[in-house]
């Protein structure tokens, strides 16, 4: 991948590419010269996306046979994969006592095990060729705890831990792992996760757009950053939470009292 901001002739696969951040990643990669394999489960949206990418492919990250079929299709068509972006994910925003074990398993299955399943399918080929990049879309919720986010926070903390271990395993292999932690993004994500009044409960919060997240994610991929936390506000809160957790807790209480 070049330092010019281009991905010319690179084969890039994006999971969860039919909406939100994944859709913007697919579009921006195509605009930057990549041969994009856009994947997802929604057939209608895949058909709409197909003219904008090189290949629109059905992929359910929870199903071994679906992942195996996608891997075979990419291998048959291109013979390799240069960039894998694990973006598929789901949220769940409710209190711990309302979060069942089935809920926990579902969130972990998609957000962690789905990414692991897809990565393990494509990673051997990257290692064999001695080059490649895996980008894992985590979250600031993978670095901090949030009330009524227990399942989601757990899944994103786990993704970051797995990614950091993978970085060490792959040292010297020519394959890099990039962890991206977006803050709140203005997509249907919160509504789909049951947090329909997120904007109303966070007045004045400037949310990133999916396009901004995609652009900064691709910059991180080009630079092979180990981890990036997007937005100055999220970086500040992350640093304060590491250094002076009581201060962040106090700021949160003040916000809740308003």
Image: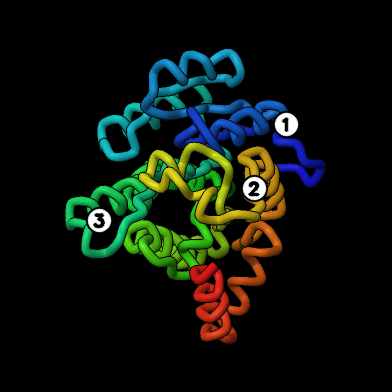
Question: Quick one: label 2 or label 1, which is nearer the N terminus?
Answer: 1
* Residue beneath the point at 49% across and 69% down: 256
Q: For the view shown, which residue lies furthest in the front direction?
A: 258
User: Nearest the camera: 180 or 123?
Assistant: 180
Q: Nearer the viewer, mark 3 or mark 1?
A: 3
Pinpoint residue 8: horizontal percent, then vertical percent: 72, 31
Q: Which residue is tagged 2?
A: 208
Q: For the view shown, which residue lies furthest in the right direction?
A: 4
Q: Helix or strand or loop: what does disc 1 sit on?
A: loop
* Residue beneath the point at 57% across and 47% down: 185
Q: Helix or strand or loop: what does disc 2 sit on?
A: loop
Say if 193 sits above or below 80 in the image.
below
Q: Which residue is tagged 3?
A: 104
Say if 153 sits above or below 218 in the image.
below
State the separation of the CA atoms marked 3 and 2. 27 Å
Q: For the view shown, which residue lies furthest in the left direction?
A: 101
Which label sits on residue 32? 1
């Amino acid at each position: 991948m070049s330092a010019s901001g281009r991905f010319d002739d690179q084969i890039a696969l994006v999971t969860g590419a039919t909406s939100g951040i994944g859709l913007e990643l697919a579009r921006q990669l195509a605009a930057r010269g990549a041969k994009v394999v856009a994947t997802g489960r929604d057939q209608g949206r895949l058909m709409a996306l197909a003219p904008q990418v090189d290949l629109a492919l059905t992929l359910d990250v929870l199903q071994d046979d679906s992942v195996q079929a996608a891997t075979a299709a990419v291998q048959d068509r291109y013979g390799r994969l240069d960039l894998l972006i694990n973006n598929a994910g789901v949220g769940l925003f409710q209190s711990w006592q309302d979060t069942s074990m089935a809920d926990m398993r579902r969130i972990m299955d998609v957000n962690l095990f789905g990414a692991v399943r897809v990565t393990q399918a494509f990673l051997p080929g990257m290692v064999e060729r001695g080059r490649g990049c895996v980008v894992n879309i985590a979250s600031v919720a993978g670095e901090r705890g949030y009330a009524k986010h227990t399942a989601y926070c757990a899944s994103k903390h786990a993704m970051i831990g797995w990614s950091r271990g993978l970085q060490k395993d792959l040292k010297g292999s020519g394959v890099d792992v990039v962890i991206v932690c977006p803050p709140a993004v203005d997509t249907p994500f919160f509504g789909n996760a049951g947090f329909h009044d997120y904007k109303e409960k966070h007045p004045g919060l400037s949310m990133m757009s999916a396009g901004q997240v995609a652009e900064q994610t691709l910059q991180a991929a080009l630079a092979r950053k180990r981890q990036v936390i997007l937005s100055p506000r999220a970086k500040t809160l992350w640093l304060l939470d590491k250094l002076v957790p009581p201060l962040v807790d106090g700021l949160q209480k003040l916000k809740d009292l308003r």
